[in-house]
Amino acid sequence: MKNTLEKLRKSNDKIDKKLIKLFCKRMKNCREIGAVKKAENAEIFDAKREAEVLSNSRKYANGEFENYALEFMKSTVAISKELQKTEREKQ
């Protein structure tokens, strides 16, 4: 059992590493999106886009863990908006 648990945890560690790298890449994109929004005098919150992102998360989960995927993306979107707000205030 312990060996199985250790293998599963090591697998999760590898997945976490990939997730964090992708998260950082997404945050860089969000920072650029924020700069474009500022240049275009656009609001940070875009209800239509947020609904699209959240809808996609459910679709990508394809039924399994759908609600968890939705919560994951809600958090990600909230962090993205916070980053854009922080970046806007710095400039």
Image: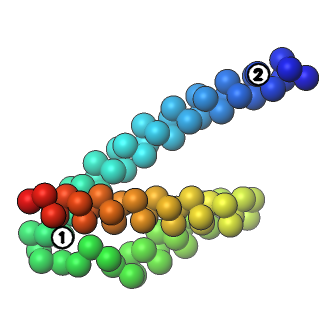
Instruction: Kindly identify the residue that appears in the image at 25 percent across and 65 percent down.
Output: 85
- Between residue 66 and residue 3, name the one nearer to us: 3
Q: Which residue corresponds to mark 2?
A: 6
- Between residue 79 and residue 52, name the one nearer to us: 79
Instruction: Kindly identify the residue that appears in the image at 43 percent across and 42 percent down.
Output: 22
Asked where in the image residue 78 lies, by quadrant, the reply is: bottom left
Residue extending farthest to the right is: 1
Q: Note whether 23 is above or below 86 in the view shown.
A: above
* Residue 63 on image: x %, y %: 73, 64
Q: Which residue corresponds to mark 1?
A: 37
Give the CA separation, mark 1 to mark 2: 45 Å
> In the figure, is residue 63 to the left or right of 81?
right
Q: Amino acid at mark 2?
A: Glu
Residue extending farthest to the top is: 3
Q: Quick check: can you spot residue 62?
A: no
* Residue 13 on image: x %, y %: 61, 29
Quadrant including the C terminus: bottom left
Query: Please, what secondary structure does the residue beneath circle 1 have?
Result: helix
Q: Note whether 5 is above or below 53 in the view shown.
A: above
Q: Note whether 70 is above or below 42 in the view shown.
A: above
Label 1 packing within 10 angstroms: few (<14), some (14-19), many (20+): some
Residue extending farthest to the bottom is: 47
Mark 1 or 2: in front is 2
Instruction: Kindly identify the residue that appears in the image at 59 percent across and 28 percent down.
Output: 14
> In the figure, is residue 15 to the left or right of 31?
right
